[in-house]
Amino acid sequence: MILVLASCGGQPSHVTQLASSSQASAQEQHVGLATEGGCVQVIVMDGGREKGTACAADARAKGLTVIDLTDTWTPTLFAPTGDQVPAIRDKYLELAAEKGQGEDALSELYGVVPALAIVRARLSDDARHTCQSQIDPKPILALDRNYTQDDREMVAQHMAWRDTLDKQRDKLAGDKLERLDALDREHAALVTVEQKLRCEGWLLDKDTDGSFTWRTGNALEMFQRRNFLMPTEKLDEDTRNALQLDSHELDFRLALRILRERVVDASGILEDGTAAAGPTPILGRDLDPPAMRAARGHITPLPNAAADLVGPATEAAAKALGWTDPAATRAFLDRHGGGVRVAVQLPSLPAYYAPHMELSAEIDRGDIFYDETPPPFRRIVPHRPTLTLYVDDHGTKRPLIRWPTTIGGWADQRLPDGTVVQRWKESDVGPRIWRDIFAGPTWLPPKSTPDKDLVKNLYNGHWALKSEILGPGPHAAYGMVLIEHLQHYRAKDGTERFDDNGIGTHGSASVTSIVNGTSHGCHRLYNQLAVRLGDFLLRHRDHAVRGEQILAKEERFKRIVFHNDESFKAEVTSRGFLYELTPPVPVNVLKGNIISKRKVPPALSAPASN
């Protein structure tokens, strides 16, 4: 069987489809670590106490949920199924163990759940905790604006003024003394930030003078990535607040985030409160930055929305395991250093849950500006695009989640003669279907993609191919998961057709674009949410496992990329691991609120697949 695939700036390619495996419950796709008498052994946990062992099947029969806390766990999408294993699985486990370097380091924000061995190592890093405990973070609270490495000259000027005024400190009064005090507070705050980043191993002593260089910005991004904050390299309010927290507490929050993803995968739930009143804290803690909890302009609960299931289930699991503070969590992980499977009691599922659920999705494109030319200023859209997933709950259309997403906008387009121009990338409106789910998808750049978009600066006079954007991996153009939008219809000759206009719902390495940015027409999700969605669809929709989609030899993507007198060979041989939903999930993309004078896309708008 031959499929034709294209997505969001990716070129169509013929792929040879592997034979499908039989449909199977996603619960049974994971391979057990150890068996005894033909059963996977789990530890029954309650109130932080171990209540003995049982077969996983017996524990499930008693209404318990089996949670995999081993370091060989992956989400269902990337787990072995039958005799097939997604090609990305080994890389996923490598990144989960934080063996990645450069772009691949600290990949939690990009859809890779860290291994629990990472939490154990961090909680046990007494030297780091001692270093952090010796620094009072309160001076950071004096800052009331964002700082970036672009402020370096301003900060240097402030330091010079401070040095000048400090020499006259005893003679100063009035406004000048107040100015010196303000400069002292700013300097102390920035030094404190850099000292805390030094304790994490990201700065040297010489970089902790409060000068806020590019090294400070890079270290801030590493701190943000480690602690699940928006990776802006800015010393923003969320980052300043996180720097106030004890290092043990930050590590404990990582443990709870890891547990949350394991609970979501094990229980097959998705509802996180985003369609209703918002996510509930877990053990009194908000584990996500505000930008991940709701899209701008969409905070009013939807009618009949499902309540948060993810937060209460994660808290119940944490209490059952005894993970109520950093010390108890460290003790548990030390006892089970090799990993363990546990069985715990979680809150009951709503009545609408079933192995096959009647699901549908709706994408609200939000406020749209069809400007003839790109605006000369950054436009803040009052109502951002959102994706809502619904279930038919005995006749009630019940929203399960409402997540921030993106639609198209202005992007560079390479013309046949090599000229690069700006073109509007449109997001298709109307009914579509989700049928094909690609785990570990790759991207096939179309000819219209400028070469400059496919290279990265090594800052040593040379450039390199941006191979990570091709995938598979967390920094691929489609992130960790791609769900294609197909148009289903019957042709005049009566044949059934599934057309792809290059649009999909997928993850994204461009985390900040989901807050304020646009795409090339696709609907981007935070990577961890894209993985949750894919897992949920596999758990609650019949599906066939099609396996790794190897490109036919004559159709493999190959391109020579030229930049600054250097050339690079780009090649992609697979499209990812394919699951096919049977039947597909209907998706409707709404027109949105077009608030520009122009009410239709510009005449020279470019299709997403070009």
Image: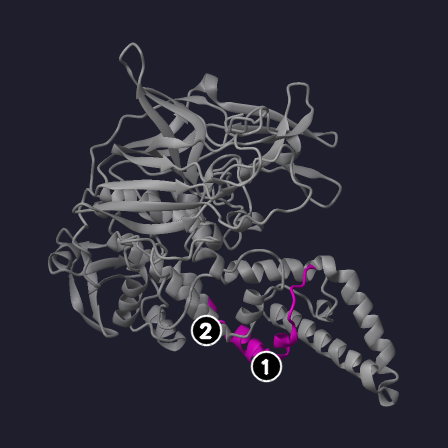
Q: Nearer the viewer, residue 296 or 345?
A: 296
> The N terminus is located in which quarter?
top left
Along the horizontal axis of the image, is 450 left or right of 9?
right
Expressed as whole percent of the image width and height from the top left, the position of residue 235 reads 62, 64
Q: Nearer the viewer, residue 20 or 289?
A: 289
Query: Can residue 520 be seen from the camera position used here?
Result: yes
The total number of labels drawn is 2
Disc 2, SS: helix
How crowded is the residue under tag 1: few (<14 C-alpha within 10 Å), some, or many (20+)?
few
> The C terminus is located in which quarter?
top right
The numbered mark at residue 134 is: 1
Residue occupying the point 53% across, 53% down: 105
The numbered mark at residue 68 is: none
Q: Which residue is mark 2?
A: 249
Query: Which stretch appears magenta?
Result: 122-148
Expressed as whole percent of the image width and height from the top left, the position of residue 118 reads 44, 62
